[in-house]
Image (cartoon, rainbow, N blue to C red):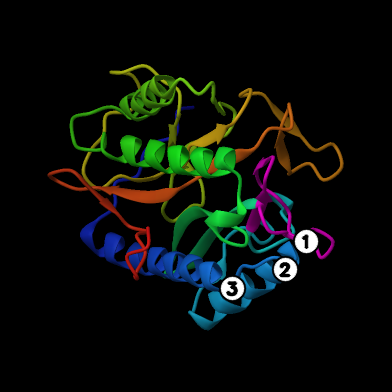
Amino acid sequence: MVERVTIKTPQEIELMREACRVTATILDEVGDIIKPGMSTEEINSFVHRRTAELGAIPSPLNYKGFPKSVCVSPNDVICHGIPAPFVILKAGDIVNVDVTSFKNGFHGDSSRMFFVGGESACSDEARELVSTTREALMVGIREVRPGKRIGDIGAAIQDFIRATKRGYGIVREYTGHGLGREFHEAPQVLHVAKRNTGELIRPGMTFTIEPMINAGSARTSLSKVDGWTVRTADGSLSAQWEHTVLVTDSGHDVMTSSPKGLF
């Protein structure tokens, strides 16, 4: 059975904005505290505490058995990294922090990349990958407006990455998704796709765009130990940026934009 896309009412959109604002606020604050020597478990503890203080619930916690309140994915971890006290961030690492908050009956989902120890501590390769992946997200977002199709988003991202001629791989197994009262709803938002395919984009739709770009091969490797952690198959670096996007009558609105204007 094909899952139906939910169109949010103006009232539902306003409720959802609160969840998105919590997520964006927490990611701003993660940027203030992240540093060399910090464990990914410390990031989890911080996110869990701040989510509660802001009147929300961390969506990842116990979702299909996920054991933590946030995904923290350093270096070659593509996504779904499980925070742990023995995973210590060091200067020069790049790390994705993926926050989803549930408030007022709605979810708000976003992730950002951070340079541990600052950009200057990271390699040229890492900085270039992070920057290119962020621009890939923005390229995808710019495709969002009524009358377009979901496939146009992935096609634009794919064309952009190919045009860089850096040999990057675009992860295919893990995609963007509809978001609202459920953590994962229709439609699926592919980051490699053909134009004029997929769901028709209509006002009131809300979904994530979250390209995962590998410095090497697009191939992935799922941990057989925890069943969650996804790494690059060749050990290369990976980067991801994510926003929750609302389709408006005239275009789009990035619901998880930083309150501080950071991203």
Label 2, label 1: how many angstroms apart (C-alpha)?
A: 6 Å
Are the residues at dot 2 and dot 3 in contact (C-beta closer than 8 Å)?
A: yes
Q: Secondary structure at mark 2?
A: loop
Of the 4 image quadrants, the one containing the C terminus is bottom left
Mark number displayed over residue 33: 3
| Residue 97 placement, left or right of 235 | left
Which sits earlier in the primary sequence, circle 2 or circle 1? 2
Q: What amino acid is at disc 3? A: Ile
Q: Could you classify mark 2 by the number of other residues whose Cα lies within 10 Å: few (under 14), some (14-19), or many (20 or more)?
A: some
Q: Residue at x 73, y 53 (%)?
A: 65
Is residue 108 within the magenta segment?
Answer: no
Is residue 73 within the magenta segment?
Answer: yes
* Towards the viewer: 208 or 64: 208
In terms of image quadrants, where is residue 197? top left
**68 w.r.t. 246: above or below:** below
Specify the segment rendered in magenta. Answer: 71-93
Q: Secondary structure at mark 1?
A: loop
Q: Could you classify mark 1 by the number of other residues whose Cα lies within 10 Å: few (under 14), some (14-19), or many (20 or more)?
A: some
Q: What amino acid is at disc 2? A: Met
Residue beneath disc 1: 88
Q: Residue 75 location, x and y as percent?
A: 67, 45
Q: What amino acid is at disc 1? A: Ile
Q: Residue at x 31, y 40 (%)?
A: 141
